[in-house]
Image (cartoon, rainbow, N blue to C red):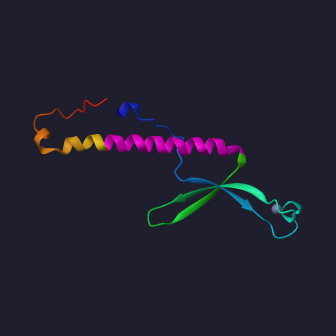
Amino acid sequence: MIGKLPITGELLRGSLLERTVRHTKDCPKCARGEGHQVFVLTVTYPGGRTRQFSVRRERVTEVRRWLSNYQELKGAIEAVCELNHDLLRPERAASRPRRKSHD
Ligand SMILES: [Zn+2]
């Protein structure tokens, strides 16, 4: 199972949000009420602190893929942790080999 973890460096944690920026002056586009669509990656840290990163439009597809990779890896790690709870059972610890046989 460990060998099947989708480990890659292409990981991002957070949420990708689409926002509309509106300039208050000297912008014909905003004067027409259109505004500009921008993408922002919002990352929340323990304690509630957040950071935001602007994402260029041409990188949005890539960022979405990296966010998806993170979720997939996180899910796989959680699944391994759940399986490892078996190792903590006292009645099994003595008789079972330490190497896990789940896969
Ligand atoms: Zn504008």
- Measured from the top left, where is residue 74 in percent x and y? 43, 45
The residue located at (48%, 61%) in the rendering is 45
The relative height of residue 101 versus residue 94 in the rendered view (above or below) is above
- Give residue 58's quadrant in the image: top right
Give the position of the N terminus as an image quadrant.
Answer: top left
The relative height of residue 47 versus residue 97 in the rendered view (above or below) is below
The residue located at (48%, 66%) in the rendering is 48
Near-viewer residue (88 or 10): 88
Q: Is residue 7 rendered magenta in the image?
A: no
Give the position of the C terminus as an image quadrant.
Answer: top left
Horizontal placement of 57 versus 80: left or right?
right
Horizontal placement of 99 versus 54: left or right?
left
Q: Which range is magenta?
A: 58-81
Mainly helix, strand or loop, the magenta region?
helix
The residue located at (48%, 44%) in the rendering is 71
Q: Is residue 73 rendered magenta in the image?
A: yes
- Measured from the top left, where is residue 17 in percent x and y? 63, 55
The relative height of residue 2 versus residue 40 in the rendered view (above or below) is above
The residue located at (88%, 67%) in the rendering is 26
Near-viewer residue (38 or 12): 38
- Give residue 90's quadrant in the image: top left
- Give residue 30's quadrant in the image: bottom right
- Measured from the top left, where is residue 20 in percent x and y? 73, 60
- Measured from the top left, where is residue 40 in percent x and y? 64, 56
Give the residue furthest to the bottom: 24
